[in-house]
Amino acid sequence: MLKTFAVIGDPIDHSLSPTIHNAAYRELNLDCTYIAYKIAYDELNSGIESLKSIKISGFNVTIPHKIEIMKFLDDVDESCKLIGAANTVVNDDDFLKGYNTDMDGFLEPIKSREISIKDSNILLLGAGGASRAIVAGFQRESAGGIVIANRSKENGEKLAEFSKKIGLQARSIHIEEIDVLDSKFDFIVNASSLGLNGEKNIIPNNLMDDQTTVYDIVYKPLKTDLINTAKEKNCNIIYGYEMLLGQATRSFEIWLDQKAPYEVMKRSILGGF
């Protein structure tokens, strides 16, 4: 029997998730398909009911629904409870269970490069659902402290409070105050939508050098202006597709209870560019 999976969000046209998952299903001859389904911010309730009506087997959740989706779930895993956001959902006869694969997906490329997080100094752009997972990941790996720069000061303050609550020193600034920062960072992470539509990098050059790891979770375009700037400064670079791949393989394994074909999924992402 055909199993259907999806990714929900808005915007959704840029998503590579259908490409990745469908490549995996073809490789393993699975009777599964994966679609992108646009659900606007204020239509989440009716969107979920639509997914239930077509007997969706599971779905990924992206901007802007990762936090709001929690209200509609019947059960969640420990990562969801900690982070307060979900990005992977299993539908078992209309019983929805949420998982969060963002934290492990984010950390995997750092660990595979054997870059130490312990006592590190971090600059994080953005304060959405992915940002909470990133903060939780840095806390778990004993980072030193984090500066959160966000367009909405209120949301930035909320994330800083969350960070302090789980044990990671944090402070929040408005994104326009980024110019007044003057110390180098061990990690600069863009978890905002900046760069998604070709915007210019706003992070001053003096905040990064060849000891800085720059991680842009925007994965399309592959080389954002931030990534290009980081290359000029000889930084360690982690691309957004690497986090996407980490999330995708975990979602696959949660839904289908078998090992994901990692290399096939990676090739499909890079082919998508």
Image (cartoon, rainbow, N blue to C red):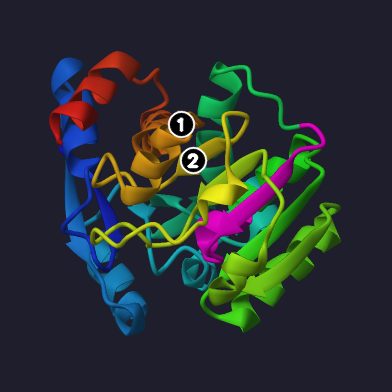
**Disc number for residue 93:** none
* Occupied quadrant, residue 172: bottom right
Disc 2 element: strand
Q: Amino acid at mark 1?
A: Ile
Q: Amino acid at mark 2?
A: Tyr
With 20 as the anchor, is 103 left or right in this view? Answer: right
Disc 1 element: strand
The residue carrying pointer 1 sits among few (fewer than 14), some (14 to 19) or many (20 or more) residues within 10 Å by Cα, namely some
The residue identified by callout 2 is 215
Q: Is residue 130 magenta?
A: yes
User: Vertically, is 123 above or below 45?
Assistant: above
Position of the C terminus, as image quadrant, is top left
With 177 as the anchor, is 250 left or right in this view? Answer: left
Q: Is residue 180 magenta?
A: no
Residue name at image x 43 percent, y 45 percent: 216
The image shows residue 234 at horizontal and vertical percentages of: 48, 29
The image shows residue 195 at horizontal and vertical percentages of: 32, 57
Please provide the residue range marked out in magenta.
118-132
The image shows residue 264 at horizontal and vertical percentages of: 23, 18
The residue identified by callout 1 is 237
Does the residue at mark 2 contact the one at mark 1 (Cβ under 8 Å)?
Answer: yes
Mark pair 2, 1: CA separation? 6 Å
* Occupied quadrant, residue 222: top left
Between 2 and 165, the one lying in front of the other is: 165
User: Vertically, is 241 above or below 182?
Assistant: above
Residue 100 visible to the viewer:
no
* Occupied quadrant, residue 34: top left
The image shows residue 171 at horizontal and vertical percentages of: 76, 66
Between 154 and 212, the one lying in front of the other is: 212
